[in-house]
Image (cartoon, rainbow, N blue to C red):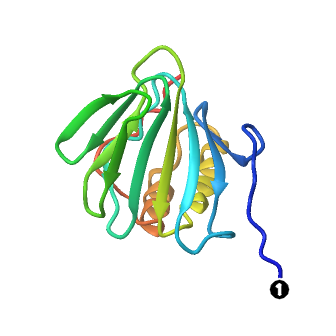
Amino acid sequence: MSVEGIILHHGEANGVTLHQTRVDYLLTAQDSKQCSLFEFTIAPGFNTGAHYHTKIEEIFYVLEGEIDLRCGDKTLRGVPGTFVFVPPGAAHAFGNSGTAPGRMLLITAPPGHEKYFDELRDLIAKGGKPDPDALAKLREKYDTVQLATLTPGG
């Protein structure tokens, strides 16, 4: 039996664009039983809005630029090297209030959150504001409890 890994160079990953913010899928549930790994290129003005998950853990790691990060009651302007661990149940958000894109790694465990991003892209692609009921069902399906409104930005 042969065991294969994954090797990607910058720009080679598949992914989605959500309101001018790029999400590259570096590792997905297709290849890992432990986690999914994403590289976000976050457009100025984008913000996820505060939310939490009941089962999902998340790890943020800023690569480039400045990223607004929230975990629980703490908020900060993350710079390259900033690390944030978000346990299940902790309200959190990330965004970019600056004028230049920022880059960040996001690890989610368990794996599979890429399916949420795929379905969110499909809702956004319909044009106009996404149907609130469809958006609520999507969030519920993927363990996301939204506390504050998402800001699409640039």
Vertical order, 44 against 4 (above or below) = above
- Image location of residue 6, percent across then percent down: 74, 59
Report x, y in % for residue 89. 26, 62
Task: Indicate the secondary structure of the residue bearing disc 1.
Answer: loop
Residue occupied by mark 1: 1
Look at 30% across and 60% down and name the residue there: 87
Q: Residue furthest front?
A: 2
Q: Looking at the image, which residue is at 53% across and 65% down? A: 35
Query: 121 or 112, which lies in front?
Result: 112
Residue at image position (75%, 37%) is 11
Q: Amino acid at mark 1?
A: Met
Instruction: Give the position of the N terminus as an image quadrant.
Output: bottom right
User: What is the tally of numbered marks visible in this picture?
Assistant: 1
Side of 32 relative to 99 (left or right): right
Q: x%, y% of residue 153?
A: 49, 26
Is 83 situated left or right of 22 in this image? left
Q: Is residue 67 left or right of residue 41?
A: left
Residue most extreme to the left: 73
